Every structure is written in structure tokens, then in C-alpha cells.
Amino acid sequence: MSDSSTSPVPPTTSAADPVPLMDPQRVYPSWGPDAERAVVDVLRSHCYVKGPQVAAFEEAFAQHTGVAHAVAVDSCTDALFLVLRAVLSRRPPEQREVILPPFTFVATASAVVNAGGVPVFADIDPDTWNLAPSAVAANLSERTAAVVPVHIFGSPADVPAIRRVLCDAGSDAFVLEDAAQAIAATLEGRRAGALADAGTFSFYPSKNLAAVGDGGVVTTDDDILAARVRALRDHGQTRKMYDHEDVGTNSRMDEIQAAVLRLKLEQLDAWTHQRRAVAARYDAAFADLPLAGQRVLPDAESVYHLYSVRTPERDALRAGLQEARIGCGVYYPVPLHRQTCFGGDDAAESCPEADALSAEVLALPCFPGMVDAEVERVTAVVRSLLAE
Ligand SMILES: Cc1ncc(COP(=O)(O)O)c(C=O)c1O
């Protein structure tokens, strides 16, 4: 896991040293110096938007994902919004429901509302923690315009099963993957973002592929959708400047972000490998403990944006880890169907699996550049806390 050529931080050897939940600066030496030069090149080019870096990054990202088109935008929130805007605007207002899981970051659902849709929260599978195909079936109707499975924590949702549910019901609902946390994850040999009608990714600085600010991308094989999102991200312009076919917005990625992301994309496989190695060690070390991990689908590979466990003793485990100065975090403490902005007071027992998971889930340190001694310390402390 540790790689002296990429880690500026000496291996943690003392039992008293803190272990962070994540630490992006560990891998900075492997990309930072090149990025510093690339940023200076962009500054000196005086071309800051709509330039060659964005075009080159889009091409590289489309190839990486295995799709025809990647459209770079300024965040995953906007990526979701723009796709949903394009999809929902083709449907009558009474047919704009969007089925999504409540166990996700708020952006998945706020994009639905901002695009003129109605979020319909469907429960998660208690083992994979992702949208349950059976819950999609239970919430599907002629009002359903789209389904948004989220690959939570980097583990692929069962998109093929969700598509079968739609097919069996004769539904033409659009399937949009929220792959914000799942860049490079695979299912049945295909990458996240290439499993459905379109996918969206986030390059927020804590993500597995991180920009030096905000960034996002839409992936799709659909030529018409790609052209529409391209237009919408740039004020609805298509044929030429100041010719607006549609009311769009400004959601463009800038040249500096694209230049940095192009460089970092080349290292992503190595960083993903390091995350998987940490996760495999945790899996082995926790196998006999009263802890459940996130079940990864057969024929899928997670990218462990977060390595989380669940236990009814979550709060005690968290307190013990904090006392031992080991970083941990609760993602997400309040599922979206309980949020006031989505009518939480009326949520009742609509998504009991998401409620239960939110009360039990805890993320442990898992990041590229994490050294062996840190993994050992986390496993030893977790084991001792759960043995008490
Ligand atoms: C599942 C999910 N969807 C959407 C987003 C929004 O991404 P961004 O911060 O790039 O807008 C995030 C960000 O954390 C996320 O985790």
C-alpha cells in the first residue's frame, strides 16, 4: 500500500499517531509537480474556457469509461441537473417522477427538483446499500420518467436488474447512473457510467479522481442527449454564438480543471488499486467480528470511495475510534426521505432499510497512500473495541 515515491508522509509507526479518514495530500508528489506546470501552461495560454484541455479530457474520459461521449461540466450536481432537465422536458408535467434511493448525498435528489421533477424515494437493499430493484418495481408507474441508481461508496448498483424491471413493466423510463463516487468501478466487465442511458461523475476534491476545485462530467452513448447537454451547459447555444435554441445555463468545466484531471486520470488505476488493497485487508481482518460490510455484487468491483461498515454499536465504535484518534465518519446520518426539504415529516416508514443503515453505518480510513502500519492500527483498534 505504501509507496515511498508517492508518499511525503513517513509511515505511521507509533500507536499514538492519528490516522485520518482520508488524506489527499499523500499522493500529491505523484501528480502535483506535473499539474503545477500544466496550470502555468494554461495561464500562459490565456485560454481559460472552451479550450483544448476540456476537449482532450472529454476524449480521455469517454475512452476510460467506454462510452461515445463525455461532456465535462462544473460539478456532478449540474451533470445530474442537465441530464434530468433534458430528459424531463420531453415528458408532460404529470409524468416527471424520478425514482431514486434515499441513501445518498442530497445532490441526487435536489437535481431532480431543480430540473422540474418529483423525487420518489425507493428503499435500498440491506446488503448492497444500493437502490433495490424490487423497490423500483414497487414504485414504478406511468408517471415515472427516470430512475437514478447511485453507486454508493463506489460499489455498483444492480443496474441490469433495474433495467429488467423496467423492461418487464414495458416502461420507457430513462436510467441515469449517479456514479459520483464510482469512477472506474465495474459491473459485468463494463465501467460505471456505461451501464445505463447516461452516467454522471463528480471531481469534487475528496473524490477518487479529484479536481483542484469543482468538476463533473456526463457520460452517454446517446448522440442526441450528448448534444443537448453540451448546449445546455453553455447557455443553450448550438450552431453558433448568440444563437440560443434553448434556455441553458453556464455549467462549463474550465481549462485548469481539465488540465489537472487529464494528468490525474493516468494515475487513477494505481490509486484504485491501493484503495482495494486496504479494503481487502479490512475484509479479512473483520470477517469474524459482529460487523457487516457493504456487499459488492458478484461480477462487480468497487472502488471504495468509502470503506464503511455497519453495526448496531456504531456510536460506541465511533467514540472509541475518535478516542484512539482514528478518523471515521457517518455517511449519511439522515436519509433523504427524512429531510425537511423533501417532505421528511410525512416519510413514515417508507424506506425502513435506509433508516436502519443510517443509524448503523460508519466509514473507516481508506485512501491511496495509506501505509501498512495505519491499516494495522485501524484493524487492531476496531477489533479491540468490538471485543469489549
Ligand atoms: C452520490 C453523489 N451524487 C452527487 C454528488 C454531487 O457532486 P458535486 O459535489 O460534484 O456536485 C455527490 C458529491 O458528494 C455525491 O456523493
Image (cartoon, rainbow, N blue to C red):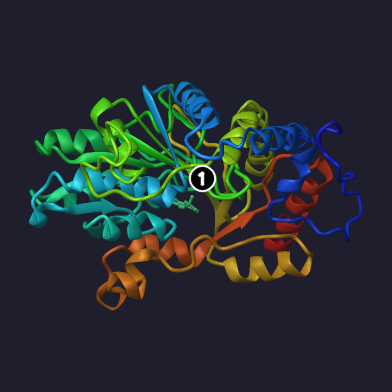
Describe the element under mark 1 as helix, strand or loop.
Answer: loop
Is residue 131 visible in this depiction of the protein? no
Q: Quadrant of residue 113?
A: bottom left
Amino acid at circle 1: Gly
Apparent side of residue 287 relative to residue 301 in the rendered image (left or right)? right
Query: Residue at left 53%, top 66%?
Result: 312
Query: Residue at left 13%, top 37%?
Result: 172
Look at the picture and state if 56 lies above or below 142. above
Q: Which residue is mark 1?
A: 215
Number of numbered markers: 1
Task: Check mark 1 vs ligand 1: CB closer than 8 Å? yes or no.
Answer: yes
Q: Toward the viewer: 123 or 173? A: 173
Q: Toward the viewer: 41 or 27? A: 41
Look at the picture and state if 190 lies above or below 24. above
Query: Residue at left 44%, top 57%?
Result: 105
Apparent side of residue 344 relative to residue 29 in the rendered image (left or right)? left
Is residue 332 visible in this depiction of the protein? yes
Look at the image and tell me in which quarter the N terminus lies. top right
- Residue 104 screen position, x and y as percent: 42, 56
